[in-house]
Image (spheres, rainbow, N blue to C red):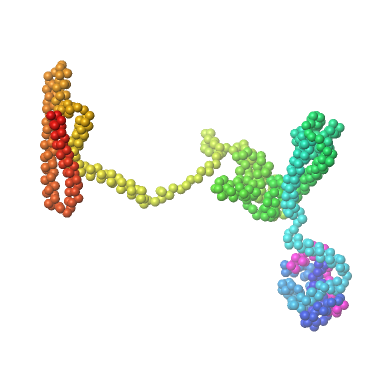
């Protein structure tokens, strides 16, 4: 039986000297306790060494994937084909099936073979002669690294975790620098407050304080390397008339130490920024060209990695960093944000306020393409980013210069141009026009109209029946009430004049107007006589109407007793006030006569 054993240095083929020992699986490890015992069980027949790491990597990947590599195929043809009658012990059953199909060799894989492979691995240095232990260890380490890189498709230039850490550290340094500089300005301001307004640059301020120390040394120190001549002269003049307090040497030493810290951190920040710029150009060159180093690094840091950022669509890249504003807008049903971290890109900063949304949307679309090209592409050039940036700059110029769109017009006539204005008016669908069935409101309106049409007809009918009563009451009640009021207030002579008012008025009118012709006098007399006749005939006509009305009611009572109960009650109620009014009239006439007498 032959045994195929794979190592990081090459392929080894052993021949089993005593096959009976393989049957004792539980005690097989005892045969490999020492190199001497192992040589009694196995003998090295052939060893094929790999020439370099690439060949070892190719062989290892073929073994992992269960394929037959070229180097292994050559060895099996040379060595094993000569002894085709013998079986070949293999650690991988899948590889054994491939060898059997292609080379027609019988392969064996069993627990005994696995225990045999474990024993060979323990005594590999003693079984494989001519191969030092250090060389085997170095080759196994190199193969392990190469195989892991191949599996993960690892490239040291594509490590985006360094960018995430670098941009986070850069932000932390900026915060600390601001705190240190503000503390330094406030601390030294007690001693020399005028220099804070003269020297505005923070780094120059710390360098100046570091060089001056006490303000009494300003006249003797040379600040030409740090400050311009004009500012240097202002500092020296301010030091002579300074209003600051005196400070001890120990305080000045602490302030100078703080200034040293600020200068060191500033230098390290510039170094870190250069490092970040180089890493961004190596990992994401197209993204760097589109939005810049800092914005690109913040996008990668926010997404977690370049590969995660490549999975985001352009709309997510556009508002990445504005998640809080987005969810607030969705909750309150307002306009969503137009940009997030991408707002700090140079292209968005160049545009006017009304075009920032359009440019940010276009920039996010091109940036998403650049990110995917950097994350998944094999090339490391920035040609695509340069082309897309040129297109965006052309688009920006078009929006700034020719932001007017053509609405109407032909080749001969001039076009009417108007600026585009986005209208976000929300139109709500009116469902009232969908239903053709009459609603409840319509039914109520129709009923009300029908009632209004019927009411005047009923009122007319009632008036026809009750005309004699109502007219008599109206004529009797209204003048009597007026007479009662006048009688109580005025003397006894006035009611006598009221009984015959029309005759006296006619006589006075005739006496006053003496020049009126006779014809007019005759016409007036005739009108007065007719009016008197009407007054006398009115009660007689009322009595006739009442007599006729009572006769008709009596006839109806006999014919319809049951059906006419309700109208009889109403008529009785109407007749009662009529009789009362007639009795009152008689009483009042008697009183008037007595008063006159």
Residue 518 x %, y %:
12, 19
Left or right of 199: which side holds 503?
Answer: left
Task: Please give the range of residues in magenta.
Answer: 36-64
Please check the rendered image and state whether residue 51 is part of the magenta-colored stretch, yes or no: yes
In the image, residue 50 above or below residue 396:
below
* Quadrant containing the N terminus in the rendered view: bottom right
Q: Nearer the viewer, residue 533 or 299?
A: 533
Q: Residue furthest top?
A: 515
- The extreme bottom residue here reads 20
Percent across and percent down for residue 144 are 78, 64
Residue at figure coordinates x 86%, y 68% from the top left: 133
Residue 486, compared with residue 147, is above or below; it is: above
Who's the residue at 88% across and 70% down the image? Answer: 130
On screen, residue 97 versus residue 512, left or right, reads right
Q: Is residue 240 visible?
A: yes
Q: Residue at x 60, y 37 (%)?
A: 402
Residue 265 image offset from top left, x and y in percent: 79, 45
Residue 562 placement: quadrant: bottom left
Is residue 387 something that shows in the picture?
no
Q: Quadrant of residue 510?
A: top left
């Amino acid at each position: 039986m032959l045994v195929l054993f794979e190592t990081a240095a090459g392929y080894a083929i052993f021949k089993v000297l005593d096959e009976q020992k393989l049957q004792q699986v539980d005690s097989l490890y005892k045969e490999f306790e020492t190199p001497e015992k192992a040589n009694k069980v196995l003998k090295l027949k052939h060893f094929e060494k790999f020439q370099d790491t690439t060949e070892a990597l190719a062989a290892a990947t073929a073994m992992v994937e269960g394929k037959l590599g070229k180097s292994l195929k050559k060895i099996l043809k040379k060595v094993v084909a000569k002894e085709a009658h013998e079986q070949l012990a293999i650690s991988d059953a899948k590889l054994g099936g491939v060898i059997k199909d292609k080379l027609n060799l019988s392969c064996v894989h069993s627990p005994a073979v696995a225990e045999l492979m474990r024993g060979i691995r323990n005594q590999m240095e003693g079984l494989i002669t001519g191969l030092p232990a250090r060389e085997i260890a170095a080759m196994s380490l190199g193969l392990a690294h190469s195989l892991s890189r191949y599996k993960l498709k690892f490239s040291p230039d594509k490590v985006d975790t360094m960018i995430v850490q670098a941009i986070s550290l850069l932000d932390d340094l900026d915060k600390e620098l601001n705190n240190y500089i503000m503390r330094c300005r406030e601390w030294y301001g007690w001693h020399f407050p005028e220099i804070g307004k003269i020297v505005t640059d923070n780094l120059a301020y710390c360098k100046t304080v570091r060089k001056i120390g006490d303000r009494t040394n300003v006249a003797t120190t040379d600040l030409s390397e740090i400050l311009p001549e004009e500012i240097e002269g202002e500092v020296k003049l301010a030091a002579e008339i300074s209003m600051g307090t005196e400070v001890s040497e120990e305080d000045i030493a602490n302030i100078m130490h703080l200034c040293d810290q600020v200068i060191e951190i500033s230098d390290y920040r510039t170094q870190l920024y250069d490092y970040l710029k180089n890493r961004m150009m190596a990992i994401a060159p197209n993204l760097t060209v589109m939005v810049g180093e800092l914005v690109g690094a913040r996008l990668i840091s926010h997404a977690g990695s370049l590969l995660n950022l490549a999975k985001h669509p352009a709309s997510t890249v556009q508002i990445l960093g504005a998640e809080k504003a987005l969810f607030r807008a969705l909750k309150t049903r307002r306009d969503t944000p137009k940009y997030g971290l991408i707002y700090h890109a140079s292209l968005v900063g160049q545009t006017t306020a009304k075009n920032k949304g359009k440019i940010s949307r276009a920039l996010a679309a091109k940036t998403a393409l650049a990110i995917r090209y950097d994350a998944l592409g094999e090339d490391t050039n920035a040609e695509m980013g340069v082309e897309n940036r040129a297109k965006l700059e052309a688009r920006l110029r078009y929006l700034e210069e020719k932001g007017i769109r053509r609405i109407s017009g032909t080749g001969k006539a001039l076009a009417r141009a108007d600026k585009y204005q986005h209208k976000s008016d929300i139109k709500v669908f009116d469902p009232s026009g969908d239903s053709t069935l009459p609603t409840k409101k319509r039914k109520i309106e129709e009923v009300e109209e029908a009632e209004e049409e019927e009411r005047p007809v009923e009122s007319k009918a009632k008036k026809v029946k009750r005309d004699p009563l109502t007219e008599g009451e109206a004529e009797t009640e209204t003048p009597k009430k007026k007479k009662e009021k006048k009688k109580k207030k005025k003397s006894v002579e006035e009611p006598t004049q009221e009984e015959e008012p029309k005759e006296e008025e006619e006589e006075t009118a005739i006496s006053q107007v003496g020049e009126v012709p006779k014809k007019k006098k005759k016409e007036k007399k005739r009108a007065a006589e007719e009016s008197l006749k009407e007054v006398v005939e009115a009660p007689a006509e009322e009595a006739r109407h009442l007599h006729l009305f009572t006769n008709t009611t009596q006839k109806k009572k006999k014919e319809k007793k049951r059906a006419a109960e309700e109208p009889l009650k109403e008529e009785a109620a109407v007749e009662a006030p009529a009789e009362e009014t007639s009795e009152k009239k008689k009483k009042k006439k008697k009183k008037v006569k007595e008063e006159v007498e």
